Image (cartoon, helix red, strand yellow):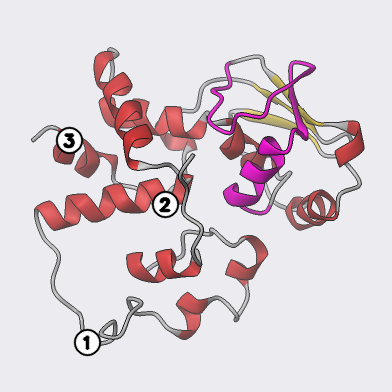
Amino acid sequence: MARYKGPVCRLCRREGMKLFLKGAKCFTDKCPVEKRNFAPGQHGKDRRAKVVGYGLQLREKQKTKRIYFTLENQFRNYFEKAARKPGVTGELLLQQLERRLDNVIYRLGFATSRRQARQLVRHGHIDVNSRRVNIPSFQVSTGDEIQVREKARKLTVVEGASEFSSHQPVVPWLEVDRDNLKGRVLSLPKREDIATPVNEQLIVELYSK
């Protein structure tokens, strides 16, 4: 499957804000957004065009895709599913993205970034309801129990992530047992529970044209 393999810090610089794609590095002075807060490329410093209308909507979509590490077709499928359901389309879109297994692993604090969480899932280190799941886009449901497999609990990345997130709050729709590296989905995420800096209405407007 195709995926972005380039330097993720360029993505943050392109959006002009921290997307927290690099884990702990994003909280240090080494973060490129802190040192070079302009678009990447030869003309990054000079390109300061005002973004309005379609450009604003496109940037919002690109930013959301990059935060959750999804490709264009996959993201479009999420939107179409949300549009077919009763309710607020933008909120339903974000709800699907939040329910991705790699995002849930990140939210529980078992990984320092969604990219790292994706790797843990792909390598078969995660169980959902006592069954191994290696699909990052797997959609969790209310009542699901997620845990790091026994053999993976001593991995350096897992131990580092657990220490890094030990003093950070967990989102209200999840419950976590940090000692046993397991968590449970208490409910489906509501819009007020999603702190991702996204204006989902702009995405809806873009796809509705």
- Amino acid type assigned to the residue bearing label 3 in the image: Tyr
Q: Disc 1 versus disc 2: distance between alpha carbons?
A: 24 Å
- Amino acid type assigned to the residue bearing label 1 in the image: Asp
For the residue labelled by badge 1, is the local secondary structure a helix, a strand or a loop?
Answer: loop
Residue 124 left/right relative to 142: right
Q: Residue at x 85, y 52 (%)?
A: 159
Q: Which residue is mark 2?
A: 66
Residue 144 left/right relative to 154: left
- In the rendered image, the vertical position of residue 20 relative to residue 144, given as above or below: below
For the residue labelled by badge 3, is the local secondary structure a helix, a strand or a loop?
Answer: helix
Reply yes or no: does residue 124 show up in magenta: yes
The picture quadrant where one finds residue 181 is top right
Q: Disc 3 versus disc 1: distance between alpha carbons?
A: 30 Å
Question: How packed is label 2: few (under 14 Cα within 10 Å), some, or many (20 or more)?
Answer: some
Residue 191: percent from left, percent from top:
40, 33
Please give the label number shown on residue 145. Answer: none
Q: Residue at x 85, y 55 (%)?
A: 156
User: If you read the primary sequence from the N terminus, does the residue marked by circle 3 or circle 2 appear first?
Assistant: 2
Start-end of magenta stretch? 112-141
For the residue labelled by badge 2, is the local secondary structure a helix, a strand or a loop?
Answer: helix
Q: Which residue is mark 3?
A: 207
- In the rendered image, the vertical position of residue 131 relative to residue 41, given as above or below: above
Question: In the rendered image, which quarter contains the C terminus?
Answer: top left
Q: Residue at x 49, y 80 (%)?
A: 34
Q: Which residue is mark 1?
A: 46
